[in-house]
Image (cartoon, grey):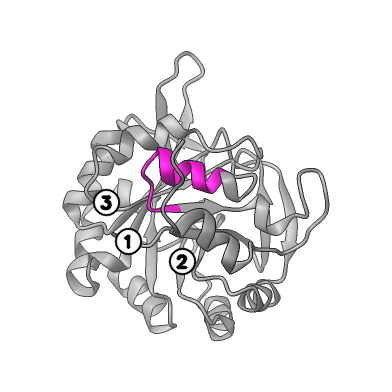
Amino acid sequence: MLRSRLIPILLLRGKSFVKTVNFKKFSYIGDPCNTVRIFNELEVDEISILDILATRNNKEPNYELISEIASEAFMPLSYGGGIKTVDQAKQIFDLGIEKIILNSEAINRPEIISEISEIYGSQAVTVSIDVKKSFFSKVQKIYTKCGTKATDLALAEWALKCESMGAGEIMLNSIDRDGTWNGYEIDLYKDLSSKLSIPLIGIGGAKNIDSAKDLIKNANCSAAGVGSMVVFQKEGRGVLINYPEPSVINAKLHNKFDED
């Protein structure tokens, strides 16, 4: 069985890390390299970096900045944003990034999933899916371009297609819960994880380590993506890069769950 993971999801806007609420308003978190250095000291196992403007502004990844970040990181990094070709993915991998994350371009051209995974392996390709409940129903609609453009794709069908095309894991992000501290929408992840054969990362709403435990235990996710809880002191308070102690993570996520 794969070891459960707690993954800081860091949003890159220009040359700064920020945190959003419902993919809209954002707060400045800090300089990317300085932030990664702090996470090094906190013994973080893995970090995902998402450039939230690259695809939206039709720009390539900022290779120079990614290189600077990767040179500071002691942990595995994954990166998403602006990747449209195998050559761009190669440049990212050559900088020391272990996984690339595809979102909008996977929807525009699903073949890119296979093109990259056939060269670098499925374990190096994550497909990120951003969803939001429809205004008129409870159906989860898939959005692209950092949550600004709705699609007609069905969630389970799309995720399964990504799996069949060679994705090694799915990253499912709830726009409705993003930055809210309201906990994960467990049923959303539970339903999708039951259909997939590859790992599922849940993102959106984490408020503490028990939120992550709830997601992993009750929705059968392999990892909990966390944002606000590791970049703010607490809800409504200022910026403070933090991460649960290894002993706490081990007790909550890695040991056998207590019987209810």
Residue farthest front in this picture: 259
Q: Which residue is mark 1?
A: 2
Residue range in magenta is 211-223
Instruction: State left or right for residue 260 relative to residue 15.
Output: left
Residue 239 shown left or right of residue 139 in the figure? right
Q: Is residue 50 visible?
A: no
Mark carried by residue 79: 2
Q: Quadrant of residue 72?
A: bottom right
Q: Position of residue 239 (x, y in %)?
A: 78, 58
Name the quadrant of the N terminus: bottom left
- The residue under label 3 is 109
- 94 left or right of 14? left
All told, the count of numbered labels is 3
Question: Element type at marker 2?
Answer: strand
Q: Give the amino acid at mark 3.
A: Arg
Q: Is residue 145 above or below residue 169?
A: above
Q: Which badge, 2 or 3, is on the more N-terminal residue?
A: 2
